[in-house]
Amino acid sequence: MLIQFITEGNGLEYPLALLHQSAFPEHEYWKPEDFKTLMALPTHSACVYMDKENVMLGFLFYSKIIDEAEIVTFAVSPPFQGRGIGKAILEQFIKKMKMENIKSVFLEVAEDNKKAYQLYCNYNFEVQTKRVDYYGKNKNAYLMLKSLS
C-alpha cells in the first residue's frame, strides 16, 4: 500500500475518472478532462491510495486556499470499500493539512451516503447546514466542517 499526494495529473486523470465512475454509478461522475483541468490549477491536488501493483484503489481530491481546504470528491473502489482504505486516506490527508497549517476542512456529502457520513463523523466533521436539492431533485447534501486548529 502506498498513499501519495499528487499535484499534477500525469496520466492519473484516467484512473481517477474510472474509479469515480465505479464508486458513483448512479450519479454524474467526473470525466478525465474534468480531473485534468482541475489538476492544472495550483489549488487542486489529490491524495491517492495505490496497491503494491500500483493500481489506484481510492483517492481524495481536494482544493486549498489560504488556510482552508475542501474535499471536492472522495472515492474508494467498490470491491475494496469497508477495508479501511477510506480511513487511511482521510487520516493521511488530515495529517498533511495540519502540517501545512490548514485551519479547517469542509465538504459536502449526500444525505443518503450513510457510510461516508459516518466516516466523516468519526473524524469529528460536524454538520453546518443541509443543502436541499444539492445533487438534484430530492438529493440533499450536508455541508460538514472540521476544525484543525
Image (tube, rainbow, N blue to C red):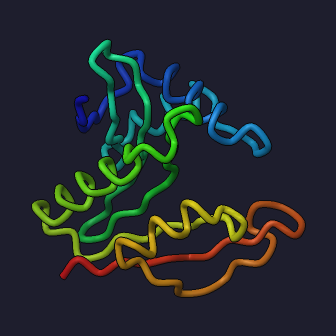
Judged from this view, the residue extending furthest toward the right is 137
Residue 50 locus on image (x, y percent): 32, 26
Q: Looking at the picture, does residue 118 appear above or below residue 15?
A: below
Q: Looking at the picture, does residue 149 appear above or below residue 15?
A: below
Residue 125 locus on image (x, y percent): 41, 77
**Residue pictured at 76% horizontal, 45% vertical:** 27
Query: Which of 109/39 is in front?
Result: 109
**Residue pictured at 32% horizontal, 16% vertical:** 54
| Horizontal arrangement in the rendering, residue 17 relative to residue 4 (left or right) | right
**Residue pictured at 41% horizontal, 15% vertical:** 11
Q: Looking at the picture, does residue 50 appear above or below residue 76?
A: above
Judged from this view, the residue extending furthest toward the top is 53
Judged from this view, the residue extending furthest toward the front is 83
Residue 96 locus on image (x, y percent): 17, 55
| Horizontal arrangement in the rendering, residue 93 relative to residue 26 (left or right) | left
**Residue pictured at 40% horizontal, 35% vertical:** 39
Judged from this view, the residue extending furthest toward the left is 99
Residue 58 locus on image (x, y percent): 43, 36
Q: Quadrant of the N terminus?
A: top left
Q: Looking at the picture, does residue 69 appear above or below residue 146?
A: above
| Horizontal arrangement in the rendering, residue 113 relative to residue 98 (left or right) | right
